[in-house]
Image (cartoon, helix red, strand yellow):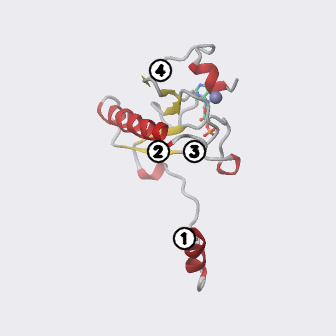
Amino acid sequence: MCIFCQIIAGEIPVKPVFENDQVFAFLDHEPMNFGHVLVLPRNHYENIEETPVEVLQAIIAAVKEIGLKIKDKLDYPAYNVIVNNGPEAGQKVFHSHWHITPRLDVGEIIWPPQKEYGPGEMEEILEKLLS
Ligand code: AMP
Ligand code: ZN
C-alpha cells in the first residue's frame, strides 16, 4: 500500500483538514509555508491521467474550499496549486495529489527560465496538439 493509502486507511495517524467520500486532505509535513496542504483522492490513482474526471471535479471543488480557508483563517493573501505529475515533473509519491501552497509574496516563487520558440516551432507544436 502506498504511503498516502496508509494515511487514508488510518494506519499512519494524520488529522484531515478536509474530507468527504471522494477526497482527503492533510498538512504536508515538510511545508513550503506553514499551512501547505495536500489534497488527494481516497482511492489510489497514480497520476492525473488515471484519475476519473468526476474525482478530479471533487478534488478541484475541495481545493477551492481549502484555498478559501487558507486565506480567511490563516490570513494568506494567495496560494499556488501545484501538481507534480510524473517522476520527471518531481512526483515522489505515486498517488495523485494536489499541493496548495500558501504565499505571502511573489518573490517566494522559483520559476524556471522561460524559452523562446524559433520560426515555425510554435505552429508545429500546435499542429501536433490538435491532431
Ligand atoms: P510530490 O513530490 O508531489 O510527490 O510530493 C509529495 C509530498 O508528500 C511532499 O511534499 C512530502 O513532504 C509529502 N509527504 C510525504 N509523506 C508525508 C506524510 N507522511 N505526511 C505528510 N506529508 C507527506
Ligand atoms: Zn495510494
Q: CA distance from mark 4 to mark 3?
A: 22 Å
Q: Which amino acid, mark 1?
A: Leu
**Rendered-image quadrant of the C terminus:** bottom right
Kindly state the secondary structure of the residue where label 3 is placed.
Answer: loop
Q: Which amino acid, mark 2?
A: Val
- Does label 1 or label 2 sit earlier along the sequence? 2
Residue at numbered disc 4 = 16
Residue at numbered disc 2 = 81
Kindly state the secondary structure of the residue where label 2 is placed.
Answer: strand
Q: Which of the two residues, 31 or 45, is positioned nearer the viewer here?
A: 45
Tell me the residue at 35%/34% (across/down).
65
Point out residue 32 in the picture as x, y percentages from the top left corner: 53, 38
Mark linked to residue 48: 3
The picture quadrant for ligand 2 comes to top right
Point out residue 121 in the picture as x, y percentages from the top left corner: 60, 80
Q: Which amino acid, mark 3?
A: Ile
Q: Which amino acid, mark 4?
A: Pro
Residue at numbered disc 1 = 130
Point out residue 89 in the picture as x, y percentages from the top left corner: 65, 50
Q: CA distance from mark 2 to mark 3?
A: 14 Å
Tell me the residue at 38%/33% (across/down).
66
- Does label 1 or label 4 sit earlier along the sequence? 4
Tell me the residue at 57%/75% (across/down).
127
Q: CA distance from mark 1 to mark 3?
A: 20 Å
